[in-house]
Structures are given as structure tokens and as C-alpha cells.
Amino acid sequence: MARTTDFSPLEGLKGRSILRLTDLSAAEIRGVVTLARALKADYAAFRGVLAQRALAMLFEKPSLRTRVSFEIGFQKLGGCVSFLDHRNERIGARETIADYGRNLERWADGIVARVFSHETLTSLRAACSAPIVNALSEIAHPCQALADAQTLVEHGVALESCHLAWLGDGNNVCLSLMELTALMGGRMTVVTPASHRPCTTLTAEIQAIAAKTGARITLTDDPAAVAGADAVYTDAWISMGQQECPEKVASLRNLSVTPELMQIAGPRAKFMHCRPAHRGEEVVDPVIDGPQSVVFDQAENRMHAQNALLLALLGALPASANPRTLAMQA
């Protein structure tokens, strides 16, 4: 008899909002990754599971991977999507965030929001009964971290023992990956200039979680600290909405991911980038296009990880799944 995978650890997510990765437990993260891999292996088994369900997408920032992966992903499961473009009018400008959310909850089963201010998300969550998913804010990008977790697992890296090295600006993606490491008990080396380290307050919160799980998160300015890493991760030095800053770019120049730096990390290290990439700045072509790069796996897995999360939040989990094809995705 074929062994089945039990998704019961995700049952407690029904109706919840996910604004930061710390809104999930380690067991729930493992469950999302497992379900995401089942989806990736065979979407036919999930056809129509979200029929008559609707997703509202509120975007204050431009997007390729986030928008397309949510829209196509939700429709693959049988649901419908309404995209609201807020690039020219911020959420809350035309009517209060509370009124806006209370209208949306009457039509939509879930809300995905990509915003400038994390407070917009917390205000929506306070006013609205529909689950809210953070599709990026200035302090967090939990969906990216879930897709990255799936990507690492697929490439044979156990989250509990993973050594992840981050180079560049201590931004929102960096913080979410620090949360992933802290929750799962792994190790992360964050290499930034002292002037561009992750938020001090959030770092303290994350380190407190790490102290309980046995995770190790080290902040340094030494790029040689990537030695022995399972993955080397970078991101754009100037995030969306930030002003161009030559001084910041100059301070980060020695953290560009080059073949020489990947040599320090080692031949088994994967290269990761959430993108869009600024080639010739934070990474050079031979690395991002090279054999150690898994950036397109990360992009694809955004859809699968987000769908897995939405199935749990909307209470549409499968009872079980045959995992025989999961090994093919490793």
C-alpha cells in the first residue's frame, strides 16, 4: 500500500493571516513545503479545489514574479482573482483601510497585499475577517522565504541544518530568511556593512527565537564568512521605492557575488536571488547564469509555496497525498 502524507499540521492555519514568517510554526513551515512539493508534482490532483473561491490582490508596488505566481497559481486551483492596482493611489487614500477591508471581505475569500508600509497590512488584518497574506512589505517577504525553503529542500538541503549566507543590504528578504533560520534551527551568516545591517529591533526578536531553537545567526562584514555555506543569497542593493544612493552602493561593492566568492563558499553552494537582479552590481553574469544558480527554481516555487499556503488559510487542504512523486522533485 502506498504511503501517504498527512497535512493535518496545517489545519490550524484556516482563517489566519500571514504577515511575517513568525506567524507560522516550524511544523507549519514544513507542512507548507511538503504540500507545495505535492502541488508541483501533480496539479491535476488538486483541480477545482478552490472553485467558487475568490482572491483579491492589492499591489502598491510593481511586480512580475509575485503577481503572476499568485494569479496563475490561484486559477490553477479553480479560483478567480481580482487585481487592484494601487501604484498610483495608496491603500487608504480614497477611503479608510478599515472600510476598504470590510468591503473586500464581503466578496473575497482571501486578500494578498504588496505594500510600502507594513502598518497597512496590520490595519487590514485588524479590520477584516478574510485572511491577509503579505506579498511584500518593507520589513518582510514571507512568501519568498517559503519558496526558498522549498527550493533548498528540493536541492537536498535540510532546513534544520542549512547554512545560509546572505550578502548585501539587510532588507526585508534578509529579515524573512533570518526568521526562517531561527524557526527551523539552522544557521545564517549575514554579511553587510555595519551601516546596512538588518533592523536592530527585529533582529533582537529573531535572535530570541533562535536562542530557543538552537539556531545560529551571525552578523558580520567579512565576505569570507560564506565559507562552507549551503547557499549564498543576495538581493538588489536599492529596494523598490528607495532613492538611488551612490554612497550605499559604494559601501556594498565588495559584497558583489562573483565566481571568486562562490569559490570561497564551495562547489556545493547554491546561488540564490529573489530578483529582479541588477547584473554587474550585487551579482555577475557567470554566477547567476552558472551551474550553481537556482534562481529560476526559486521563481517557479513561489507559485507552489503560495498555493500551499492559500489552501491551508482557506481551509481547502487535501486529506492526504501520495508522496511517491515528491522524490522526483528533489
Image (spheres, rainbow, N blue to C red):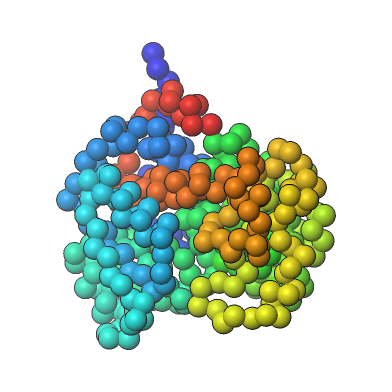
In the displayed structure, 29 sits above or below 7; it is below
Q: How many marks?
A: 0
Give the quarter of the image for residue 86: bottom left
Give the quarter of the image for residue 112: bottom left
| Residue that protrudes farthest toward the top in the picture | 1
In the displayed structure, 221 sits above or below 233; it is below
Residue ID at (25%, 73%): 102
Query: Could you tell me if residue 286 is visible in this image?
Result: yes
Between 15 and 298, the one lying in front of the other is: 298
Q: Position of residue 138 (x, y in %)?
A: 52, 72
Q: Position of residue 208 (x, y in %)?
A: 68, 61
Q: Position of residue 8 (x, y in %)?
A: 40, 38
In the displayed structure, 282 sits above or below 92; it is above
Query: Could you tell me if residue 182 is visible in this image?
Result: no
Position of 265 with respect to 151 (left or right) is right
Between 134 and 299, the one lying in front of the other is: 299
Quadrant containing the N terminus in the rendered view = top left
Between 235 and 25, the one lying in front of the other is: 235
Position of 59 with respect to 53 (left or right) is right
Q: Position of residue 239 (x, y in %)?
A: 55, 71
Position of 254 with respect to 117 (left or right) is right
Residue ID at (23%, 50%): 79
Residue ID at (19%, 46%): 51
Residue ID at (36%, 77%): 87
Give the quarter of the image for residue 66: bottom left
